[in-house]
Image (spheres, helix red, strand yellow):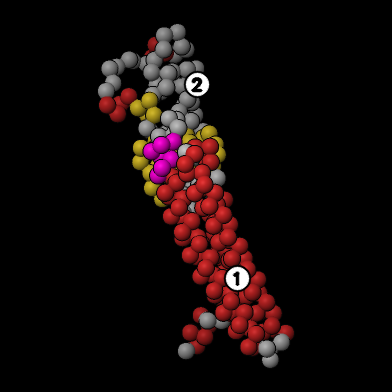
Amino acid sequence: MALLAVVRSPPLTFLQTVVSLLLSAVALLCPYWCEGRQKMPKPLCTRTKHTKCIPVPGIFNSASIQFSWETGDDRFVFPSFHSGLWISCEENIYSDEWEEKCRSFRDLTPRSEKGILWLCVTMELMYVGLLSISCVLLLVQLGLRRWLPSSQHWGMLLNAFSAVFTVLGGLLGMVAHMMFMQVFQVTASMGPDDFNPYSYGYSWAF
């Protein structure tokens, strides 16, 4: 019973809700909801690109690159990428040094899915907002418990409202995540030619 009382204690509930809010905010801002690899034709060799490229006569160091008749997947490169609600970052295939180029995920989304994307963003913000309200209610409950021990009824009422807001926020967040995956799958199949996911899956922020 003592362990159950500790688990149900308002300070621990408040701490758990704050941690949940912080993790949700970090995940919302991070571009690591999905990650995978793209399938892109090999670029032409340049002064900054000497490997995994198509040789071009006259380019510096191109003599050291042996041309071969490549077929199948050998004609392609598979750069990594990761996407979030706001931006999508891809490995730069035009340089031997590893670097990323990022662009707005909204610009990649087909016109037919932009409305769903904005609805997803709205629901994610509502999710974080509801968790914030829950944290405020639990903080007020802790204040009443500390300074007005006789008002236990109001503290329990605030705790109940906090639980309702937390559950509603969780449901909104879950639906928003599902909507994002739908938008991402459509973008992967109907998006621009330079965004061509070959394989992808969930990342840590999702």
Question: How many C-alpha atoms fall within 10 Å of the one at disc 1: few (<14), some, or many (≥20)?
Answer: many
Q: Considering only order in the chain, which callout, 2 or 1, is on the residue closer to the N terminus?
A: 2
Name which residue lies at 39% across and 11% down.
Answer: 63
Name which residue lies at 72% across and 84% down.
Answer: 147
Q: Magenta residues?
A: 185-191
Name which residue lies at 46% across and 22% down.
Answer: 49
Pinpoint residue 47: horizontal percent, then vertical percent: 50, 17
Pinpoint residue 154: horizontal percent, then vertical percent: 65, 85
Residue at image mark 1: 134
* Quarter holding residue 26: bottom right
Question: Which amino acid, by three-letter code, is at mark 2?
Answer: Thr
Of the residues tagged 1 and 2, which is closer to the observer?
A: 1
The CA span between labels 1 and 2 is 53 Å
Residue at image mark 2: 48
Question: How many C-alpha atoms fall within 10 Å of the one at disc 2: few (<14), some, or many (≥20)?
Answer: few
Q: Of all residues shown, which one is farthest toward the bottom? A: 150
Residue 15 is marked as none
